[in-house]
Image (tube, rainbow, N blue to C red):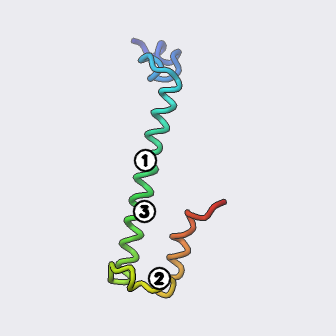
Amino acid sequence: MSSVSVGRQGLPGRAAGLSYDAIIATNGAVMQMFNHGLSAAGMFFLVGVIYSRTHTRDLKEYGGIWTVMPLSLIHISEPTRPY
């Protein structure tokens, strides 16, 4: 198969006989997996930061995390804010 015929097909997946809906769904699934990886890694990072600042894993001992790390808490809560 030459590069000209693949170029005329539009997408490489289309040359394999896949519909555009299947290609778009696959792209969406890959994007969702990538985004999940970023957000999960970010949350584990934030848990590590909180642990390094408080030196405890007992949630009852936090007693107001705002007193320990006020600016970091603002940055943690920013992505959850509705727009």
Nearer-N-terminus badge (2/1): 1
- Amino acid at circle 2: Ile
Residue at (52% x, 82% y) in the render = 70
Nearer-N-terminus badge (3/2): 3
Residue 62: where, in percent of width, then height?
42, 84
Image position of 66 with respect to 27: above or below: below
Residue at (47% x, 43% y) in the render = 31
Q: Residues within 10 Å of mark 3 (few under 14, many from 20)?
A: few
- Amino acid at circle 1: Phe
Residue 28: where, in percent of width, then height?
49, 38
Disc 3: which residue: 42
Residue 34: assigned label: 1
Q: How far apart are marks 2 and 1 (CA)?
A: 30 Å
Query: SS for tag 3?
Result: helix
Q: Can you tell which quarter of the image residue 61 is in? A: bottom left
Drawn side of residue 19 relative to residue 44, left or right = right
Contact between marks 3 and 2 (CB within 8 A): the answer is no
Residue at (41% x, 17% y) in the render = 16
Q: How far apart are marks 3 and 2 (CA)?
A: 18 Å
Contact between marks 2 and 1 (CB within 8 A): the answer is no
Residue 21: where, in percent of width, then height?
52, 26
Nearer-N-terminus badge (1/3): 1
Residue at (44% x, 16% y) in the render = 17
Residue 65: assigned label: 2
